[in-house]
Amino acid sequence: FFLMIRRPPRSTQSRSSAASDVYKRQLRLRTWSEIEESLLSEVEGFKLTASDLREEQNKANSELIKAESDLARLKFKKRRNKLLKIWRKIIAKIVNVDADIDYANFRRKVFKDSRDSIKNQLANIEIESKRAEKELEDVSKHCLLYTSD
C-alpha cells in the first residue's frame, strides 16, 4: 500500500517549480527585512524640534475642536428634525380638532335653526288652533242663536 503525502498545489507540475517557489519566498523575506532596516535608519535620522511638536499638537487640537463642533451640529440637526416632526404632528392634530369644532358648530347651528323653526311652527299652530277655537265658538254661538229662534 502507498502512503501519499499531500503537497500544496503548484503552478506547474515540474519539480523545479517547487524549488523556485522556495527561492522566491526567501527573496521576498529578504526584501521586507531590507525595507524594515531602511525605514528604521530613516526614523533614527529624523529629529523633531519642540516647536514642530507644538505645531503638530495645535493642529491636532484644532481638528479635535472642529470634530466636536461638527458632532454638536449633527446632534442639533437630529434634535431639530425630531422636534419638527413632533411639531408637524401637533399641527395636524390641531387642524383636525379645528375641523371637528367647525363641524360641531355647524351641527349646532343646524340644530338651533331646526329648533327655532320648530318653535315658530308650534307658535303658528298654536295661533291657528286659537283662531280655530274662536271660530268654532263663534259658529256654535250662531248655531245656538238659530236653534233658539
Image (spheres, grey):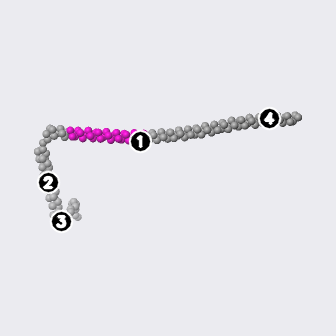
Marks 2/1 in contact by CB < 8 Å: the verdict is no
Real-space Cα separation, disc 3 to disc 1, in angstroms: 72 Å
Q: Amino acid at mark 4?
A: Asp
Numbered disc 3: secondary structure:
loop
Magenta segment main secondary structure: helix
Q: Is residue 5 visible?
A: no
Q: Amino acid at mark 2?
A: Thr
Marks 2/4 in contact by CB < 8 Å: the verdict is no
Disc 1 residue crowd, few under 14, some 14–19, many 20+, Cα 10 Å: few
Mark nearer the viewer, 3 or 4: 4
Mark nearer the viewer, 2 or 3: 2
Q: Which mark is residue 14?
A: 3
Q: Quadrant of the C terminus?
A: top right
Horizontal placement of 147 versus 52: left or right? right
Q: Earlier in the sequence, mark 2 or mark 4?
A: 2
Numbered disc 2: secondary structure:
helix
Residue behind mark 1: 85
Q: Amino acid at mark 3?
A: Ser
Mark nearer the viewer, 2 or 4: 4
Residue at 74% over, 35% down = 130
Numbered disc 4: secondary structure:
helix
Judge by depth and name the residue closer to the eye, 67 or 45.
67
Q: Which mark is residue 31?
A: 2
Residue at 20% over, 38% down = 58
Q: Earlier in the sequence, mark 3 or mark 4?
A: 3
Q: Quadrant of the N terminus?
A: bottom left
Residue behind mark 4: 138
Q: Earlier in the sequence, mark 2 or mark 3?
A: 3
Whole-percent x and y of residue 18? 17, 61
Horizontal placement of 30 versus 101: left or right? left
Q: Amino acid at mark 1?
A: Lys
